[in-house]
Amino acid sequence: MSDLSKIDNRLLNDIQKRIDSNSLRTLKTGNSLIDFCSNDYLGFAQDEELKEQIISEIKKLRRIGSTGSRLLTGNHSLTEKLEKNIALFHDAESALFFNSGYEANSGLISTITKRNNTILYDELSHASLREGIRLSNAESFSFKHNDLSDLENKLQKISEEKFIIIESAYSMDGDICPLKEIVELAEKYSANIILDEAHATGVIGKNGEGLAHKLNLHKRIFARVHTFGKAIGNNGAVILGSEILKNYLINFCRPFIYTTAPNLMQVIAVDLAYKKLENSEQHISRLHVLCDYFKNTISKYKHVRLLPSDSAIFSIIIPGNEEVKLAATYCQNAGYDVRPILSPTVASGSERLRVCMHTFNSENEIKRLCKLIESITEFIERDKANVL
Ligand SMILES: Cc1ncc(COP(=O)(O)O)c(C=O)c1O
């Protein structure tokens, strides 16, 4: 057997395992269904006025491409200005742009943690945070999701420099971390907090400044990561922290140093989206009104198991990959884009329909979606009972 067919066989074997467990991932292009699944919470990704502003500003540029890394030819006054504006918006000393939240999280953690350090991370931490932990030389332990006593137990046992890694709004459950209590624990045990604000950016706080800012805890947090791929309607991310942290990352963070700088179209688009955010208080309030409407409506249905959520993400537990896929297909066939989250992305038995709310969703659409979810969950329950 040639080496090529040997490796093909190994790859095919692993793919076959995914097929067997009903968890094969496939790429799909966009559709015309009603969007209850994208991260475009505020509709910025499709905002006509914003689009026009971006096009008009881009036309004024002499060059639009990056041309190199930030440390070579890719640094531009517009990028530096954007970082300053974003730092101001979130009330941080400094901001450093990354090409994605994944790179920001993995780069930050793997760069600043050292061999004798310990990382404590919430067990539901996003893959990008786990990637940073995996690449780090520090020791790491998870603590139970949002569980302060488990976190404190673990903090008590560590004497070296320590880091606590958490998210403002958890991407799969949609619940919020008990930030005030975690900040107090971090101060009691001299730990540094890294806070991923991906799903809080543009969603939590008067103008979407994030959870730490809303609770006035931001000055007590070592580093915050805000991403632009969700409510900002674009892609990329910033790490917020001290000037010392920024300088350190510019010098040692490999995903910052050895990559091409953001292109200027992206820089302009993110800058204009942030300007729009500054005047989005009412728009963000509307999002929360719709979230409450969804929670109130769906909680009246007795077959639906909704996880507690204070963000724009809602998870309805439907155990089993096959079952949750069936539920999603049912909603999709009725015109609603709701996606199943399968194991192993979430723990087996906690497979779920993930519903994301947007300012452009209507109350009628929400009402209809809730009914659809109730019908299909009831059907699945009945079907299971009949089989047993
Ligand atoms: C909590 C969280 N952090 C980080 C990321 C990664 O951000 P990006 O998509 O910009 O790489 C995501 C994206 O899915 C996320 O949900």
Image (spheres, rainbow, N blue to C red):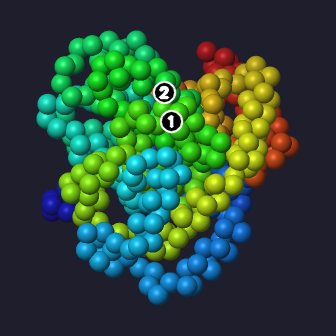
Place residue 149 in its image quadrant. top left
**Residue 3 left/right relative to 79:** left
Residue 201 to residue 184: above or below:
below
What residue lies at 57% left-to-right and 36% top-to-bottom?
A: 214
Left or right, residue 298 beside residue 129: right
Task: Work out whether residue 83 can be spotted.
Answer: yes
- Label at residue 179: 2
For label 2, the crowd category at 10 Å Cα-Cα, with few meaning under 14, some 14 to 19 and many 20 or more, is: many
What residue sits right under mark 1 in the picture?
Answer: 212
Question: Residue 316: image x %, image y %?
Answer: 63, 30
User: Which is more toward the observer, 346 or 134?
Assistant: 134
Q: Residues within 10 Å of mark 1 (few under 14, many from 20)?
A: many
Q: Quadrant of residue 140?
A: top left
Q: Amino acid at mark 2?
A: Leu
Rendered position, 340 above or below 51: above
Q: Quadrant of the C terminus?
A: top right
